[in-house]
Amino acid sequence: APSGSTAIVTLPDGTTVDLNSGSSIAYSQGFVITDRDIRLNGQGHFTVRHDSALPLRVTTAHATVSDIGTAFDLRDYADDSEAVVTVTEGAVNMAPAGVKGNRCDVRAGQTARLDVASGTISVGKSAADSPYQWRRAVVKLSGQSMTEIADILSRAYGVTVAVKSRRAEALHFNGEFNLRVCSLTDVLEALAATNNISYSVKGSLV
């Protein structure tokens, strides 16, 4: 899925994967025949065709998530400080990539976060609403910091949004916009209209 776009892929086993901006998956020619192993870079939502004899396994740079019959969202971009899996149906097993032990089951309604630096996994109740509902092309802000908003805008629009001052980093905003309707300029103008921030654009850098 190119930067600023999303994509939907149907795998040979019938599993569907929604890919977020700047994400990719890869699998071998032996997929479904000898294994169901997938390599993910970025973020994808998996609706899995369950097969107990040949379980689906998704590996990222920092984590391995194994299907126990489920639908789940997995995010682990190269520059992320954590790998995050949110389960909407069924359950998965999550572990640090390449590490035996330290595994945990994550069930529907739960979100697990794997800290890249320590390799520890924490599991909690999933938030009612994610600020970046990327599959619906909707962003709902409920007090997110400008730093978090910059990350959301960077991925949503395929640009680099950098926050240049500590004062701006400390600001928090509320609001909602649809990515299919609002351009990046529309969003930036709405934020600037609060008279708390200003912005400039240089190519793909904001």
Image (cartoon, rainbow, N blue to C red):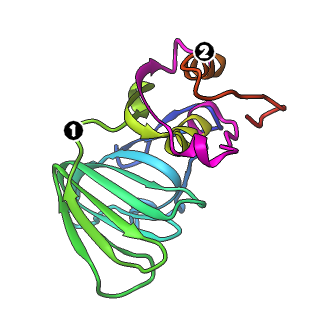
Q: Is residue 109 visible?
A: yes
Give the image location of residue 181, x and y in percent.
52, 11
Name the quadrant of the N terminus. top right
Q: What mark, if any, has residue 128 been given in the picture?
A: 1
Is 165 magenta? The answer is yes
Q: What mark, if any, has residue 60 been given in the picture?
A: none
Of the pair 5 and 115, the residue shown nearer to us: 115
Is 21 magenta? The answer is no
Dividing the picture into quarters, in which one does residue 203 lie? Answer: top right
Residue at 51% in and 45% down: 170
Q: Amino acid at mark 1?
A: Ala
Considering every residue shown, the one lying at the far top of the view is 181
Give the image location of residue 92, x and y in percent.
24, 62
16 relative to 201, above or below: below
Of the pair 49 and 158, the residue shown nearer to us: 158
Dot 2 alpha-carbon crowd within 10 angstroms: few under 14, some 14 to 19, many 20 or more? few
Is residue 133 left or right of 163 when viewed as pictured?
left
Give the image location of residue 154, x and y in percent.
62, 38
